Image: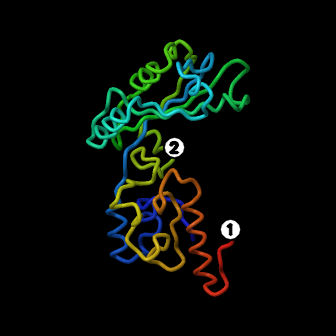
Amino acid sequence: MIFDVTPKQLLEIAGHKFSSIYKWQLARYRYGMGVFKVDWALSEQVPFKSDVCKQAGTVHIGNTFEEIAQSEYLISKGQHPEKPFVLLAQQSLFDNTRAPKGKHTLWGYSHVPNGSTKDMTDSIEKQIERFAPGFRDTIIGRHTYNTNQIEAYNPNYIGGDINGGVIDIGQLFTRPALRGSPFRTSSKGIYICSSSTPPGGGVHGMCGYHTAERVLKDLFPIHYSVKI
């Protein structure tokens, strides 16, 4: 069995099959920042001052490196920055099925402390407005998700954490536990393949790819070889 879940769900589903030390390791797994997400319907394209941003499918808004670092630092300390780092996606620029002719869609999110229910809509829109004056005038409608709503949408997003757990030096190679293979559990035949395994969230598909390699090697230790 291969589970695309985080350690919390893995314990709930199959914890009775695991060794005590493996259960202890999973229980100590740390979850990271949550996100506050907004979906917008727009009357026109986002009026960025930068022509490059007007042509980009994804735009990262944060001004200077120092401002971004300060924003993320405050969130790691449980605070909500006034000028958050914002990730935006403008799919309707390239996919005309996303919105009626002449209109556009946009979604974006900022990081927030894990489990936060603070409404970040105003802070996010102010941040976009800094680099796209008149943005708020283009908004036809919006829908928001706080961390609780994001977790309700997908139980893997613990506290709104869409990356499957903190990715730092203490939990980069040992996610979800310190083992010879992070994809194997302590119970033979049970594997974990989610972003709670290396290389973590954001490297789309690679956690499952490496887990599949591990499963095939275990099933066919002599004959299996990787062909790329």
Image quadrant holding the N terminus, namely bottom right
Q: Nearer the viewer, mark 2 or mark 1?
A: 1
Q: Is residue 102 left or right of residue 205?
A: right
Residue under the point 45% across and 45% down: 151
Which residue position is annotated with label 1?
Answer: 228
Mark 1 lies on a secondary structure that is loop
Viewer-proximal residue, 158 or 16?
158
The label on residue 131 is none
* Quadrant housing residue 54: top right
What is the total number of numbered labels drawn onto the structure image?
2
Mark 2 lies on a secondary structure that is helix
Residue under the point 49% across and 53% down: 201
Which residue position is annotated with label 2?
Answer: 153
Residue under the point 45% across and 22% down: 125
Task: From this view, report whether residue 156 is shown above or below residue 49.
Answer: below
Q: Is residue 187 left or right of residue 210?
A: left
**Amino acid bearing label 2:** Tyr
* Quadrant housing residue 208: bottom right
Image quadrant holding the C terminus, namely bottom right
